Image: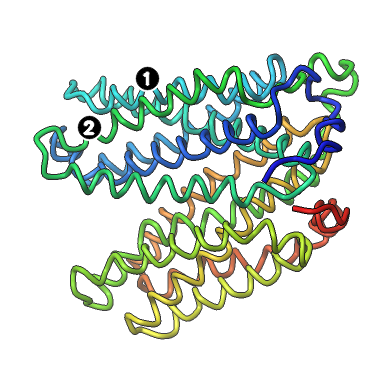
């Protein structure tokens, strides 16, 4: 699918007229989403092997993962600063290059202090890319004139699945996780270097706006959409961290059954993201968000109320609908709050990602020690229901860009 000639003649005010053809930038940004998904999946699925290699316990692994989330917030702030001065393509390239350095360092058998520092560096790169790739995705989508973020995030999810399969494929080799981490690092660095020329060339905020206008951000909208991102990542982190544990420990399923909850969740995320752009065009943002929230909250409540393996797997699959829909739709809506401040808005909304990830993993875990994991999954369900209060914000932003304009896809 390529842009129409009219799309090429109508760039966003912050996009340079010297930009590469839009289809090239779109392909480069898709590659960046894929590199992000690949790198993160390889890291988290390599944790058991890295834990054994470094001789650390589960508590230390949890601390490392928490550290990555905190450093990712730092990376998102860094992406904002770079984008304001040099544009979002510079922020995205920087984040990918940082990951390209950190991932091979994690792969090397080093003293623990170096290993921990490499993890922290990866966290900075992760957050920088999270923000930078969303900035670029929104910019390409706006210039294209049709919803694209669903497909961009689908590329991330598909690459994450490929990353997990890569780790599985090399698990029996002598170097094991080192091979997968190095592959992911090379991929990130390559996309970062090549993308520096082919990502969308936006004009930095410092050059586009006078000093008096740069700080006038839509703060109420940032908090509203930030809450939606927080709620989504409470769900994502809770299911990612605890679904397998719940099936194995609480429901006493067989070892091969326990991972199926997470697999079903990721499959639903991928399928939903592949159709999100078309559904935005058909239904509009607010209606699509409402439907996704109700479906996923119902799925999580099924996990809470029905202590059966089949119900749990189906419930986790339904939970993936919200993650598949809400992340791309929310970033798209946030970018439309104030197009001239799009990069700044997205960087701030992205920060809520990490708060949600920590809450989903930690608070659900704490509840598991009390009333139990089944009851604990009510927390992400409640977080999703609270998103319904933000629906007017989705109606207030331009919905279904392509369908409303009636242009062909």
Q: Is residue 22 rendered to the left or right of residue 229?
A: right
Res. 62 mark: none
Q: What secondary structure is found at the residue carrying circle 1?
A: helix
Residue 132 visible in the shown view: yes
The residue shown at (76%, 17%) is: 18
The residue at which mark 2 appears reads as 179
Q: What secondary structure is found at the residue carrying circle 2?
A: helix
Q: Residues within 10 Å of mark 2 (few under 14, many from 20)?
A: many
Res. 101 mark: 1
The residue shown at (76%, 60%) is: 281
Q: Quadrant of residue 90?
A: top right
In front: label 2 or label 1? 2
Upstream in the sequence, badge 2 or badge 1?
Answer: 1
The Cα atoms of the two marked residues, 2 and 1, are separated by 15 Å
Residue 133: x and y in percent read 59, 34
The residue shown at (70%, 41%) is: 2
Q: Is residue 202 above or below residue 129?
A: above
Tell which of 328 and 187 is nearer to you: 187
Residue 347 visible in the shown view: no
Residue 264: x and y in percent read 40, 67
Q: Residues within 10 Å of mark 1 (few under 14, many from 20)?
A: some
The residue shown at (25%, 72%) is: 257
Residue 348: x and y in percent read 67, 36
Q: Is residue 6 rendered to the left or right of residue 379?
A: right
User: What colour scheme has been applied to the protein in the rendered image?
Assistant: rainbow
Residue 346: x and y in percent read 69, 37
Q: Is residue 289 rendered to the left or right of residue 239?
A: right
Tell which of 172 and 237 is nearer to you: 172
Q: Is residue 45 above or below residue 292?
A: above
């Amino acid at each position: 699918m390529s842009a129409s000639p009219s799309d090429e003649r109508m760039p966003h005010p912050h996009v340079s007229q010297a930009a590469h053809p839009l289809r090239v930038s779109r392909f480069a940004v898709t590659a960046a989403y894929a590199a992000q998904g690949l790198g993160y999946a390889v890291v988290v699925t390599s944790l058991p092997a890295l834990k054994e290699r470094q001789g650390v316990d589960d508590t230390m692994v949890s601390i490392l993962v928490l550290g990555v989330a905190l450093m990712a917030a730092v990376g998102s702030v860094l992406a904002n600063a770079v984008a304001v001065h040099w544009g979002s393509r510079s922020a995205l390239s920087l984040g990918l290059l940082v990951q390209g350095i950190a991932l091979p360092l994690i792969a090397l058998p080093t003293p623990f202090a170096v290993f921990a520092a490499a993890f922290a560096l990866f966290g900075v790169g992760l957050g920088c890319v999270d923000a930078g790739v969303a900035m670029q995705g929104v910019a390409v989508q706006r210039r294209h004139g049709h919803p694209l973020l669903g497909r961009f995030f689908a590329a991330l999810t598909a690459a994450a699945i490929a990353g997990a399969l890569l780790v599985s494929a090399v698990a029996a080799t002598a170097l094991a996780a080192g091979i997968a981490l190095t592959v992911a690092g090379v991929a990130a660095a390559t996309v970062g270097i090549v993308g520096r020329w082919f990502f969308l060339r936006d004009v930095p905020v410092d050059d586009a706006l006078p000093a008096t206008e740069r700080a006038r951000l839509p703060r109420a909208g940032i908090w509203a959409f930030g809450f939606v991102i927080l709620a989504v990542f409470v769900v994502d982190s809770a299911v990612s961290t605890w679904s397998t544990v719940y099936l194995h420990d609480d429901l006493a399923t067989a070892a091969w059954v326990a991972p199926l909850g997470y697999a079903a969740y990721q499959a639903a995320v991928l399928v939903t993201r592949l159709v999100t752009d078309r559904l935005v065009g058909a239904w509009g943002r607010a209606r699509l968000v409402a439907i996704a929230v109700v479906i996923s909250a119902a799925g999580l409540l099924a996990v809470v109320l029905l202590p059966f393996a089949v119900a749990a797997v189906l419930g986790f699959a339904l939970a993936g609908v919200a993650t598949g829909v809400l992340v791309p739709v929310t970033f798209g809506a946030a970018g439309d709050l104030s197009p001239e401040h799009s990069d700044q808005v997205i960087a701030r909304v992205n920060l809520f990602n990490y708060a949600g990830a920590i809450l989903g993993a930690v608070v659900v875990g704490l509840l598991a020690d009390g009333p139990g994991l089944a009851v604990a999954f009510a927390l992400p369900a409640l977080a999703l229901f609270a998103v319904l209060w933000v629906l007017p914000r989705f109606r207030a932003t331009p919905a279904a860009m392509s369908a409303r304009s009636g242009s062909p896809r």
